[in-house]
Amino acid sequence: MTNKRPRFSFGLMILGFNFVLAFILNLSLGSVIIPFESIWKVISGQSTDSSAFYILVDYRLPKAFAALTVGGSLALSGLIMQTFFRNPLAGPFVLGISSGASLGVAVLFFGSSIFLGGVAFQNLSSLSIILASSAGSAVVFGIILTVALRLKDVMGLLIVGLMLGSFTAAIVTILSNFSSAEALQRYVFWTYGSLGNINPTELNYMIAFVALGSGGALWLSKSLNGLLMGESYAKSMGVAVKKNRTLLLVITSLLAGASTAFAGPIGFVGLAVPHLVRLLIPTGDHRILIPAVLMTGGTLLLLCDTLSQLPGFEGTLPINGVTSLIGAPILVSLILSKRKILM
Amino acid sequence: MFAVENLTTGYTAGKNTVKVTEEVSFQLPAGSILGIIGRNGSGKSTLLKTLALLLPKLKGELYVKGKSLSDYSVSERAQLLSVVTTSRNFSGILTGWDILRLGRHPHNGWYGKLSPTDKTILKEVIEKIGMENLVNQLINTLSDGQLQKILIGRALAQQTELILLDEPTNHLDLHHKAEVFRLLKTIALEQNKTLLFATHEINHALLLCTHLLLLHEGKAFFGTPKVLAQDPIMRQLFPQELVAFDTKSNQFKICF
């Protein structure tokens, strides 16, 4: 063969290196700067009683894990949707999946405040928030899939997605009109997204859900590769398209739902990270894309989280704002430099 | 052996059933080439997609090796029957190699890792379709003819007894048409595979195919090219004043 088949291990290594770097930076920077040496001492167990230990173990490590879990899962759900619809504009936000998650959470917050009163509202468990958010995502994604089966036109599908987003937002607005001020405040803060307030139990749930979703996606990576040629070809190659469609619905809803439950509706990561990764590692092989997208999504959110609380700032900026503020120019400049997107 | 019994194709739209072609029956021994011909809208693609199980059949049965196709599992079917459709709605990130390796999908494990045997098969396929120099290019940089060869190569890599192709020479220039038809003939002759393809290239079908299936007004007519070319149904399909049949060359000619 005259031209060599490209190998992507180098690209994966670069992404892995960036990921580790972003993780360490995230642990180190903040209102108190912790030197790398102290981080190493804490991680390796040499220091168990310093102030660095408490800051890292109680606050920064859980937050860093939350950032990489949320970033990775949103990016992966975007990748799955772009592959499934063979559409570069697909993503949890564009197709209304994030809005569905928001609706799920809004119904839970406002519904419990309206119908069950303040006590029930205060006692909502983290699992119920994840489940409400995932159920909201699943309902919207289910509608999108049903429409996609009837409607072959991609533009039509995107318009339906945007309409669903608008429709769910309208329900949230109407619900909020009847709910208590506390519930409304809690919902508004939730939409800003916060990684720092996630408690260990919530983090464990989120990691478990996202690990389950990512494992499922990896298990289906061969089928996802087949789907890049379209459903007819995939079916003729032995892909159980109907079964996998349902599985992918569940996985995407879990990924988008679990992360949105705690980080709020982050619009940018799911759409942009798969493009970013394909520009750096131009392959359609999901066995490479899935780990790459997980790492890059995590890296992006770790960096954004670091920037949202750089030394000198009082408090932290909303993570949702920072993500788009940083990520959008990166993606636009990459697209302009390569003069195309790959999808 | 591939056999079709009393097959009726069509669509179900809500409560309405639209029949396209009724009572299609034929048998093909291994190594046959069947050309499905007919006017635009006669139901060639619908029939081909139904035979490939991409559309549900309204009635009838399909048999491979004496066993009904519906009795085979999804992955078993993918090892018996491969398809080349007219759809080009692929992800632009795929290279020729990516598409070819998908041909091994029904044969390799859950993770899709290529075995040494898979790699040998793919290497042979790439040589057969003559794409050694272009196989690592993105498919949207390939010409229609080159992409078609990749798609046929993918079907070959799937190593099925039956290959179904929907208008394999559509949009191709004469050079690429010749290459594709020659490739199909070699596959049938050398590898004893059964090929079925829908086509508008009636003259090429008359030369290449061992059997023809003519679709006209919801009915199917099956026979060898020699017999079917003389059949009165051909006169209905091609009125004498528009397209004349030259018995010497066994070819149709447009009457200008």
Image: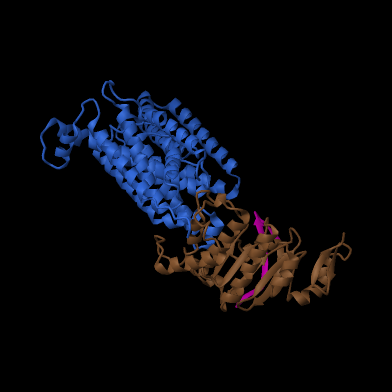
State the residue lying farthest toward the right: B241
Image location (x, y in percent) of residue B203: 75, 67
Above or below residue A239? Residue A291 is above
Q: Is residue A245 visible?
A: yes
Kindly indicate the quadrant of the structure image that contains residue A42.
Answer: top left
| Left-right relation of B178 to B68 | right
Instruction: Please tell me how many numbered marks the rendered image carries.
Output: 0
Query: Whole-percent x and y of residue A183?
Result: 36, 28
> With respect to residue A206, does B186 lie above or below?
below
Query: Which quadrant of the figure contains the C terminus of chain B?
Result: bottom right
Residue B14 belongs to the span the image colors magenta: yes
Chain painted in brown in the figure: B
| Residue range highlighted in magenta | B1-18
| Nearer to us in this view, B187 or A60 | B187
Which color scheme does this rendered protein use?
by chain
Left or right relative to A191: residue B201: right
Q: Locate residue B117 relative to residue A151 in the image: left or right.
A: left
Q: Main secondary structure of the magenta part?
A: strand
Given residues A140 and A311, the one toward you in this image is A311
User: At which x and y percent is residue A276?
Assistant: 43, 40
Is B238 in the magenta? no
Name the image quarter holding the N terminus of chain B: bottom right
- Relative placement, left or right, of A329 versus A44 is right
Asked where in the image residue A185 lies, by quadrant, the reply is: top left
**Chain rendered blue:** A
Q: Looking at the image, which is closer to me, A211 or B103?
A: B103
Taking the spot 71% from the left edge, 65% from the top edge, the residue there is: B21
Q: Is residue B43 above or below residue A130?
A: below
Locate residue B81, reporting x and y percent.
55, 68
